Image (cartoon, rainbow, N blue to C red):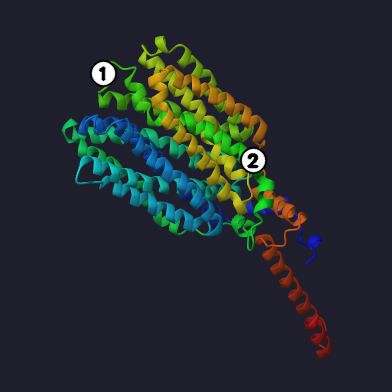
């Protein structure tokens, strides 16, 4: 086939026909969206559960046993596992397909959560080493969920709606993740009320065990999913042109990686140590129930940001919604940091400002980074690029977690918020320079552009488009022969037609 014949033309009417498919097809796309994104509430739960348990472990086992080093080790084990899961399964979902990657993620998440709850050892120190390893396994499952679930949900939403794909994507990915925080605090308050202060060992084991429930609840539905049209057409069928792929995606990839790093540097450490921060502004810093209640309020204040981001992204675009969200770090980070001495004495006011900072971040990078990272890249490498972007974000989370305690101890807690404001400035600038202005273009249009870019630069491999086009050409040729046979049944003509 000549190079000219290999170019694919985008058909806008075909997209409209896909969106206006049969009722059964639309129901299937809805089912795919929900099945892919629903269990992300478990990821939000797992990301936030350590915030309260970091206050439980010192009370149960002593501050000398569960010291700052052990706390950081357990917390970072999950982050390291998440990074490995994001990269590994991000690549795997482009090779294996979305379904099998999602199933692997679910199994790892359930298994890791169960083993965290079962952690034990000959000594308490040994038990925390087992917990560290199992948190790493859980983290792998959490990381695996990000690329395969977000990518699958976005691709299904692309076939479901022409105008509101962004909002749909946010509502089934970042909203469950955001609800995971308040959900973790509600569960903690319920379990703490049942167990009391005398059974903290049972408390933390139950908290980890309950993390199995959400991914298990959708396992069957994930098992029943199948490969979507976008992946069938856009995946590589032969050799992958790595250099050309980097040449096509480098600017967007640099943007999503850097912006995600800035966001997670602030968001993850603030989420993980929110209990510690709150304990500094309330009268009794060791009252678990009071800390959990304020933590719950803080999480609830941030949730409406998801709805704001979902509404804005389909109207002003992903880029400007991102910049709007980062402005929350800049504005409220400076307010809290510069006025810390006064604001810290008024707990309710501090929680409101802190919640608004997190809420705006939720509306911006919290909502948009997953969306932008799953829309900025062609289907053939979408999982890989998403996983890499999210992994760099988690590197930012590791750095933020490692830096939190030294910053608090040596510079003061106010600098935690001032540095958050500086990250907001960096995020705004990077978004303006590196992130494309995306609205509701068809994801397949980008796949076709990527395919034609590769062909233009001499790539001789095949994608789903090439295989299907060849098949359609063969079918068309057979139909022409069949028509000619009907018109003229002469044996000589039949032989000549077939030989051609």
Report how far apart the C-alphas of labels 1 and 2 lie in the structure.
Answer: 47 Å
Give the answer, above or below, for where 468 lies relative to 19.
below
Callout 1: SS: loop
x, y (%) of residue 296?
35, 28
Judge left or right: residue 191 versus residue 276.
left
Residue 310, image x, y percentages: 55, 35
Q: Please say whether residue 45 is visible from this viewpoint.
A: yes
Question: Mark 1 highlights which residue?
Answer: 284
Residue 404: give its label: none
Q: Which residue lies at the image location 48% right of the left edge and 55% below the top edge?
A: 101
**Residue at image coords 24%, 43%:** 127
Q: Quadrant of residue 424?
A: top right
Vertically, is 446 above or below 277? below
Q: Position of residue 494 (x, y in %)?
A: 80, 86
Q: Name the residue rendered at 43%, 56% in the picture.
A: 103
Q: Nearer the viewer, residue 431 or 297?
A: 431
Give the residue at the far left of this rendering. 198
Q: Nearer the viewer, residue 220 or 350?
A: 350
Q: Label 2, on which residue?
A: 252
User: Looking at the figure, which quarter contains the C terminus?
Assistant: bottom right
Q: Is 459 in front, or is 158?
A: 459
Q: How many marks?
A: 2
Q: Residues within 10 Å of mark 1 (few under 14, many from 20)?
A: few
């Amino acid at each position: 086939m000549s190079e000219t014949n290999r170019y694919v033309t985008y058909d806008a009417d075909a997209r409209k026909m896909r969106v206006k498919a049969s009722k059964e097809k639309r129901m299937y796309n809805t089912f795919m969206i929900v099945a892919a994104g629903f269990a992300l509430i478990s990821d939000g739960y797992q990301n936030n559960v350590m915030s309260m348990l970091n206050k439980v472990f010192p009370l149960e086992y002593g501050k000398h046993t569960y010291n700052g080093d052990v706390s950081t080790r357990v917390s970072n084990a999950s982050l390291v596992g998440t990074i490995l899961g994001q990269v590994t399964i991000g690549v795997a979902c482009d090779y294996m397909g979305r379904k099998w990657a999602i199933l692997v993620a679910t199994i790892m998440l359930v298994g890791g959560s169960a083993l965290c709850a079962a952690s034990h050892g000959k000594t308490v120190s040994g038990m925390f080493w087992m917990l560290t390893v199992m948190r790493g396994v859980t983290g792998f499952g959490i990381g695996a969920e990000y690329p395969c679930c977000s990518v699958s949900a976005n691709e299904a939403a692309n076939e479901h709606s022409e105008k509101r794909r962004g909002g749909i994507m946010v509502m089934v990915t970042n909203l469950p993740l955001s609800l995971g925080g308040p959900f973790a605090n509600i569960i903690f308050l319920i379990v703490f009320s049942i167990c009391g202060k005398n059974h903290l060992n049972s408390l933390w084991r139950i908290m980890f065990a309950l993390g199995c429930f959400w991914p298990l609840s959708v396992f069957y539905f994930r098992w029943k999913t199948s490969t979507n049209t976008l992946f069938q057409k856009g995946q590589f069928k032969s050799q992958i042109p790595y250099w050309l792929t980097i040449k096509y995606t480098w600017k967007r990839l640099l943007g999503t990686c850097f912006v995600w790093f800035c966001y997670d540097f602030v968001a993850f450490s603030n989420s993980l140590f929110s209990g510690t921060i709150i304990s500094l502004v309330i009268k009794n810093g060791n009252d678990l129930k009071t800390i959990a209640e304020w933590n719950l309020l803080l999480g609830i204040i941030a949730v409406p940001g998801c709805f704001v981001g979902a509404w804005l992204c389909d109207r002003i675009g992903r880029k400007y919604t991102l910049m709007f969200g980062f402005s929350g770090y800049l504005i409220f980070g400076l307010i809290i940091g510069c006025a810390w001495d006064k604001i810290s004495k008024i707990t309710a006011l501090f929680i409101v400002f802190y919640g608004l900072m997190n809420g705006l971040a939720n509306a911006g990078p919290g909502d948009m980074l997953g969306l932008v990272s799953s829309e900025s890249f062609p289907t053939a490498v979408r999982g890989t690029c998403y996983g890499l972007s999210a992994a760099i974000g988690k590197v930012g989370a590791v750095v933020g977690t490692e830096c939190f305690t030294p910053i608090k101890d040596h510079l003061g807690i106010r600098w935690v918020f001032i540095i958050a404001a500086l990250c907001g400035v960096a995020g705004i600038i990077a978004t303006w320079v590196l992130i494309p202005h995306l609205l509701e273009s068809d994801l397949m249009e980008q796949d076709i552009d990527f395919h034609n870019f590769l062909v233009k630069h001499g790539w001789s491999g095949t994608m789903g488009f090439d295989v299907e086009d060849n098949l359609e050409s063969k079918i068309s040729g057979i139909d022409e022969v069949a028509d000619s046979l009907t018109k003229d049944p002469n044996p000589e003509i039949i032989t000549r037609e077939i030989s051609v």
